Amino acid sequence: MHLIVLALGLASDPGSAVAEGDSAYTRNDLAAARSRYEAALAAPDSFPALWRLARVESELGEDARGKEQQELIGSSVLHARAAVRVAPDSALGHEWLAVTLGRKALKEGPKKKLALAREIKSEVDRALDLNPQSARAYHVRAIWNRELASLNFVERMAANTVLGGVPKGASMENAVHDLERAVALDPGNINHHLELGRTWLQLDRKDDARRELERAVALAPGATARDPHYQEEARALLARLPRSDRDTLPR
């Protein structure tokens, strides 16, 4: 009985549940963080719980597979949409809706990916209108630019069908610009450097790519639970560069 009362007490205190979720998130215990943020939805319109749930579910979805991945990413989108509904003038809700839709798009085929493109751009632009200093929003818009600018012929034909053409303004140059802006605003973020390095590689700018990828590897992880994964990706991309240029790579 005591445990039941205790559980009910936690559920009725969304602020405490969010704080416990944040503590778990800091420890990279994403499953526990998700559980505590869900408990905070005893107050169903808790904006702090909603955007945090969107964040943690989208990150859990990155490492999941199959049906579990679909469910996690789908739930993250639903929670992000709810966050925007509850606090339409908060940049955080729009940021995380753009992030979750972007992650959903990356798991989809060409037509579904393109169908999501307009909403992603709308949400990220709204986030930047509300908070021009959002490194995360610049990052998302950069990936939007890169993905659309990298469409092959078949995908461009699909864009003509789904969108009436590739959205204007999507370019690799804009992808680089937005990622450089993200790095300037949040230089300790490993993923910003990783994706900027990846973008430079696509542009065959190997020296620039090497610089950013080595920075991604050298930074101390801890900003997100996925930092070790991002650093593994950076090392794998560096391995594709000439060995003579990797002799001093941090181990």
Image: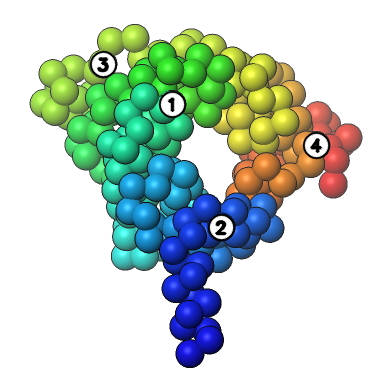
Q: Residues within 10 Å of mark 2 (few under 14, many from 20)?
A: some
Q: Nearer the viewer, residue 123 or 47?
A: 47
Determine the secondary structure under disc 4: helix
Is label 2 or label 1 in front?
2
Is label 3 or label 2 in front?
2
* Numbered badge on residue 218: 4
Q: Which residue is mark 2?
A: 16
Give the residue drawn at x 88%, y 35%.
248
41 to the left or right of 226: left
Is label 2 or label 4 in front?
2
Is label 4 or label 1 in front?
1
Q: Residues within 10 Å of mark 1 (few under 14, many from 20)?
A: many
Farthest residue toward the right?
248
Name the amino acid, label 2.
Answer: Ser
Q: Which residue is mark 1?
A: 91
Q: Quick one: label 2 or label 4, which is nearer the N terminus?
A: 2
Residue 13 in picture, x, y percent from top left? 49, 60
Farthest residue toward the bottom?
1
